[in-house]
Amino acid sequence: MPNKPWEKLNEIDRTLRRLFPPGPNQETVPVKIEMLSGFELFNTRPYHNYDDYSDGWRIEGGGVVVQREDLDDAVREFSRRVKERRDK
Protein backbone atom coordinates (compact mmCIF):
# COMPACT_ATOMS: atom_id res chain seq x y z
CA MET A 1 0.00 0.00 0.00
CA PRO A 2 1.47 3.38 -0.95
CA ASN A 3 2.08 6.06 1.65
CA LYS A 4 0.44 8.72 -0.58
CA PRO A 5 -3.08 9.08 -1.92
CA TRP A 6 -3.47 7.10 -5.19
CA GLU A 7 -3.89 10.23 -7.33
CA LYS A 8 -0.61 11.67 -5.97
CA LEU A 9 1.44 8.69 -7.18
CA ASN A 10 3.44 8.96 -10.38
CA GLU A 11 1.69 7.33 -13.37
CA ILE A 12 4.50 4.76 -13.68
CA ASP A 13 4.02 3.79 -10.03
CA ARG A 14 0.25 3.43 -10.49
CA THR A 15 0.69 1.33 -13.64
CA LEU A 16 3.03 -1.14 -11.93
CA ARG A 17 0.86 -1.36 -8.80
CA ARG A 18 -2.22 -2.09 -10.93
CA LEU A 19 -0.40 -4.97 -12.64
CA PHE A 20 0.44 -6.73 -9.37
CA PRO A 21 -2.09 -5.64 -6.72
CA PRO A 22 -1.64 -6.89 -3.15
CA GLY A 23 -4.12 -9.35 -1.76
CA PRO A 24 -4.72 -12.97 -0.79
CA ASN A 25 -4.82 -14.18 -4.41
CA GLN A 26 -1.65 -12.38 -5.45
CA GLU A 27 1.70 -14.07 -4.95
CA THR A 28 4.71 -11.87 -4.36
CA VAL A 29 6.00 -10.91 -7.80
CA PRO A 30 9.41 -9.29 -7.84
CA VAL A 31 9.62 -6.58 -10.47
CA LYS A 32 13.13 -5.36 -11.18
CA ILE A 33 13.82 -2.09 -13.00
CA GLU A 34 17.40 -1.50 -14.11
CA MET A 35 18.99 1.47 -15.82
CA LEU A 36 21.44 0.24 -18.45
CA SER A 37 24.24 2.15 -20.14
CA GLY A 38 26.52 1.11 -22.96
CA PHE A 39 28.04 1.91 -26.33
CA GLU A 40 25.28 2.12 -28.96
CA LEU A 41 22.99 0.30 -26.54
CA PHE A 42 19.75 1.93 -27.67
CA ASN A 43 19.99 4.99 -29.94
CA THR A 44 16.67 4.12 -31.54
CA ARG A 45 15.78 7.52 -32.91
CA PRO A 46 17.04 8.79 -36.27
CA TYR A 47 18.44 12.01 -34.81
CA HIS A 48 20.72 10.17 -32.36
CA ASN A 49 24.43 9.90 -32.95
CA TYR A 50 25.01 6.17 -33.43
CA ASP A 51 28.69 6.35 -32.41
CA ASP A 52 27.98 7.21 -28.80
CA TYR A 53 27.09 5.85 -25.41
CA SER A 54 23.44 5.73 -24.46
CA ASP A 55 21.27 4.50 -21.64
CA GLY A 56 17.89 2.89 -21.27
CA TRP A 57 15.81 0.62 -19.07
CA ARG A 58 15.17 -3.08 -18.51
CA ILE A 59 12.10 -4.26 -16.58
CA GLU A 60 11.70 -7.89 -15.50
CA GLY A 61 8.84 -9.53 -13.65
CA GLY A 62 6.00 -11.98 -14.00
CA GLY A 63 7.87 -13.89 -16.70
CA VAL A 64 8.26 -10.79 -18.89
CA VAL A 65 11.45 -8.91 -19.81
CA VAL A 66 11.35 -5.57 -21.67
CA GLN A 67 14.08 -3.13 -22.71
CA ARG A 68 13.39 0.37 -23.98
CA GLU A 69 15.28 3.62 -24.21
CA ASP A 70 12.76 5.60 -22.15
CA LEU A 71 11.27 4.49 -18.83
CA ASP A 72 7.69 5.39 -19.72
CA ASP A 73 7.92 3.37 -22.95
CA ALA A 74 9.43 0.43 -21.04
CA VAL A 75 6.62 0.47 -18.45
CA ARG A 76 3.95 0.76 -21.14
CA GLU A 77 5.36 -2.23 -23.06
CA PHE A 78 5.90 -4.22 -19.86
CA SER A 79 2.28 -3.62 -18.84
CA ARG A 80 1.01 -4.66 -22.26
CA ARG A 81 3.02 -7.90 -22.25
CA VAL A 82 2.07 -8.84 -18.67
CA LYS A 83 -1.63 -8.39 -19.50
CA GLU A 84 -1.21 -10.32 -22.74
CA ARG A 85 0.49 -13.17 -20.88
CA ARG A 86 -2.34 -13.31 -18.32
CA ASP A 87 -4.98 -13.46 -21.05
CA LYS A 88 -3.48 -16.64 -22.57
Image (cartoon, rainbow, N blue to C red):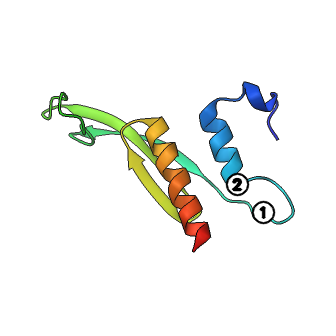
Residue at far right of view: 24
Q: Amino acid at mark 2?
A: Phe
**In percent of the image, x 36 and y 38: which residue is there?**
69
Return the x and y of residue 71 as percentages of the image width and height. 46, 37
85 sits to left or right of 21: left
Sequence order check, earlier mark of 2 and 1: 2
Residue where numbered disc 1 is placed: 26
Cβ–Cβ under 8 Å for marks 2 and 1: yes
Q: Is residue 59 visible?
A: no
Q: Amino acid at mark 1?
A: Gln
Query: In what element is the residue under mark 1?
Result: loop
Return the x and y of residue 42 as percentages of the image width and height. 27, 41
57 sits to left or right of 7: left
For residue 86, the mark is none
Residue at far left of view: 51
Query: In what element is the residue under mark 2?
Result: loop
Task: State which quadrant residue 6 falls in.
Answer: top right
Give the crowd class for mark 1: few <14, some 14-19, many >=20 residues within 10 Å.
few
